[in-house]
Image (spheres, rainbow, N blue to C red):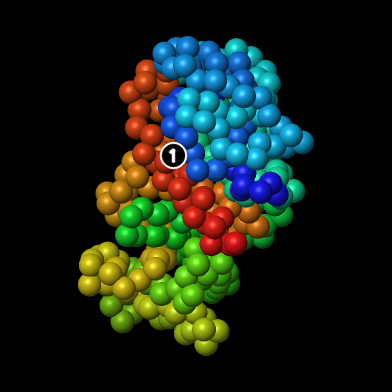
Amino acid sequence: MTTAPLFAVTPGEPAGIGPDLCLLLAREAQPYPLIAIASRDLLAKRATQLGLAIELITVAPSACPTHAAKAGSLYVWDTPLAAPVIAGQLNPANAGYVLETLSRAGQGCLDGHFAGMITAPVHKGVINQAGIPFSGHTEFLADLTHSEQVVMMLATHGLRVALVTTHLPLKEVAAAITAERLTRVSRILDHDLRTKFGIARPRILVCGLNPHAGEGGHLGREELEVIEPTLERLRGEGIDLIGPLPADTLFTPKHLDDCDAVLAMYHDQGLPVLKFKGFGAAVNITLGLPIIRTSVDHGTALDLAGSGRIDTGSLRVALETAYQMAASQG
């Protein structure tokens, strides 16, 4: 590791707003050296399209910068495209390029070159269209780092929400909430809040699955048969878990003012509340990895690529969160 922690950012889908976000943020100095793993040619052309005068400084892990780039400049680990890019127009030919940027960033973290990686949005559909099975950043990085279980957590000011299940059809959620999965997710959440966020004893609120947390078994038995017994066993390990609580009243100041994270049972139980509270200023964090990875909370916004009409708020929060997590790990 260099004297100053070095971070990697991947601009994601080259036809989307990821390159724009990196260039717009490069107008300001960062507190730490930040390397964009991307096509230098892509960034140069997008900067011209946006009317930005950004100095692109070519670097590589073998010759890492030891200080942050000055305002108006950006370190770039040049990663060649397979085909020219037109802002807003997807091209499956560049799917391999997108995955190469992620591999370079992830492996760089594993090798100790980078203190963490920050990702702009990718387009899952065009990668699959290229014939490459791909379900998302989270799964890709879990495979790259040989991580058995990972946890998706989104955060904004005053609220963190982690998920027991992620991208599942609603009809499959109940069966997926097993004692084994709930145990693994809870342990990872508690561990990473301690080690990556510096929280000595995390207090975690747990949502019930059913309305009114099952109403004593009258509105579903998952709380009685799976969730409550599992939480009780985990409390015996010293994990501070409160619940299961009805999700419709859990997300109120009475409960949230005294907790470090909420554990929701499924995607649309917890994330609508978080995004209502902080959309555009939220960050997606992958827990359970041996590396730090944060991401924006939005998609590729192809219609806005090259327009300059974008908000950099979520990428700013993703960067700040990665910096804070690295500092917490010492």
Where does the image place residue 123, in percent across and percent down from the top left? 52, 31
Count of residue discs:
1
Q: Is residue 205 above or below residue 158?
A: below
Residue under the point 50% across and 67% down: 198
Measuring 32% from the left and 60% from the top, which residue is drawn there? 158
Question: Looking at the rendering, which quadrant does residue 38 occupy?
Answer: top right
Q: Which quadrant, please, contains the C terminus? A: bottom right
Say which residue appears at 47% left-offset and 70% top-offset.
199
Answer left or right for 270 relative to 84. Answer: left
Image vertical order of residue 42 relative to residue 99, above or below: above
| Residue in view at x 62 percent, y 56 percent | 289
**Residue 113 figure quarter:** top right
Q: Position of residue 2 (x, y in %)?
A: 69, 46
Indicate whether 270 appears above or below 75: below
- In the foreground, 258 or 123: 258
Q: Which residue is mark 1?
A: 315
| Residue 185 makes an appearance in the image | no
Q: In the image, what residue type sits under mark 1? A: Leu
Q: Residue furthest right?
A: 62
Along the viewing direction, whichever of 312 and 91 lies nearer the viewer: 312
Q: Seen from this angle, which residue lies furthest bottom?
A: 236
Does residue 261 lie above or below 42 as drawn? below
Q: Secondary structure at mark 1?
A: helix
